[in-house]
Image (cartoon, coloured by chain):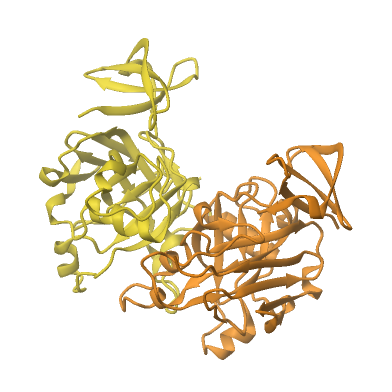
Chain colours: A yellow, B orange
Amino acid sequence: MTQWVRFRSAEGRAGFGSLERDQIREHAGDLYGTCSPSGKTYPLTAVTLVCPAAPSKIIALWNNFHALAKKIDKPIPKYPLFFIKPASCVVGPGEPIHRPAAYSGKIAFEGELGIVIGKRCANVSVENAANYIFGYTCVNDVTAIDILHADPNFAQWSRAKSCDTFGCMGPAITTDLEWSSRNVVTRLDGVERQNYPLQDMVFSPGELVSHISHDLTLLPGDVIACGTSLGVGSIKDGSAVEIAIEGIGVLANTLAWSR
Amino acid sequence: MTQWVRFRSAEGRAGFGSLERDQIREHAGDLYGTCSPSGKTYPLTAVTLVCPAAPSKIIALWNNFHALAKKIDKPIPKYPLFFIKPASCVVGPGEPIHRPAAYSGKIAFEGELGIVIGKRCANVSVENAANYIFGYTCVNDVTAIDILHADPNFAQWSRAKSCDTFGCMGPAITTDLEWSSRNVVTRLDGVERQNYPLQDMVFSPGELVSHISHDLTLLPGDVIACGTSLGVGSIKDGSAVEIAIEGIGVLANTLAWSR
């Protein structure tokens, strides 16, 4: 189990490396290809962590937990149901979430497990899917909730969830995470709001990668956000949201006061 | 009015340039920034045209033409309704459309005008939007139509329209196109199936760029597919679809025989 992070040094240089207690062992090369230690280490407190993945797209699931399906009274889907969030919405740990300039409605948090793809991936079997998963990260699938059903004829999943800064990810990508024994915990201003077991997932990471790769090609760094479960709520301006998964870390982002 | 194309030379070199009758005047530099003639010209017949834009994302509209809204008996939307197609689905003129390996249902063509963004663009006014439009191209918004409403609880816009090769674009990007006097003409195996005036658009290109840029940041090369109108139909394996807009050219793609 390795926790990979990307960072910006105090001098503004970009780097990546493995997290070892409170030190980052910098690596050189390609995180998803061949890389090796550069020889440098940085204290975690001396750098700024940035988003650990650089996805070309985020595939985000709806209705992928049994408990939530039961609560919203929807049948378990036969196939993963997803929408797409673009790269332009991605931010890393500690970065502010910004309210869209023309939107004054509710903004919701959704704590999720993110699968980070390690290799170009098309038409893979469930059995082989693990070979294409680089690791796992925490995702806050931020949503302009009043946009979602504003038009009765067209659910605006992409629009409500693709605003700049609405794809929070990090703080690390953890390889070989035993996801099935972990919970996703979401705290709003320090108060626990979500705490659900990943074991309750409808389509497992391997099934998601296999199914989705039959529709479209996944690329290294692409992220599949596995969907959320019970406890979603809205974020007030100035409030801090933390998404925590043991073994990955805590992803913290604050909704900035309106400009 | 300049028609910009990207091409691959017989030796496999990538280039771009302006189309002048049957010659390409190659340019060097950044198509969306500063570029100038390289001094070389290529006969159009000596190169392979590739997708003229390299979008990080495609924003694709639903219900953006009055005639289609009337036919499907839906009200005119108050706000542009869109989904997102990822970069991984993009192909250029002449490239085959591939049926997804696990899908045996109907595949539909949708001829559309594509807006190509020229400059990073957030929160722009309708009045200023034209400054961020680099030009226009033809789009075939290919759709796995049986997926779209396969789940009664979740319309699968992104999945049905994001399969590899389902974002056909080209053959050129034309600057300063007088879109409002043009028609989109779609031919299936040479038979006209769509011929609709862009003047019938609900949200104009300037309005689309302004509205969408208030939700998310558009980047140079990003494409807004303006939605289709009457005459959409399905493509049989082996059939050729042409999307033609006067001043841009003809985008031709064939649905490959199933593998």
Q: Position of residue B252 (x, y in %)?
A: 67, 67
| Residue B79 shows in this picture | no
Residue under the image location 57 percent in, 68 percent down: B141
- Residue B222 or B208: which is nearer the viewer? B222
Residue drawn 80% across the image and 63% down it: B177
- Quarter of the image with the N terminus of chain A is top left
Quarter location, residue B78: bottom right
Q: Residue furthest top?
A: A39
Query: In the shown orientation, is residue A259 left or right of residue B102?
Result: right
Image location of residue A194, percent across then percent down: 18, 50
Residue A192 as seen in the image, left or right of residue B67: left
Relative image position of residue A154 (x, y in whole percent): 44, 74
Q: Which is more toward the observer, B230 or A139?
A: B230
Which percent across, then down, holds residue B254?
60, 69
* Vertical position of residue A233 compared to residue A17: above or below: below
Instruction: Give the residue at x 25% y 17%.
Output: A22
In this rendering, position of residue A152 left or right of residue B179: left
Q: For this view, does A157 lie left or right of residue A197?
A: right
The relative height of residue A65 versus residue A77 in the rendered view (above or below) is: above
**Measured along the vertical axis of the image, is residue A30 above or below residue A192?**
above
Kindly tell me whether residue A144 is visible in this rendering.
yes
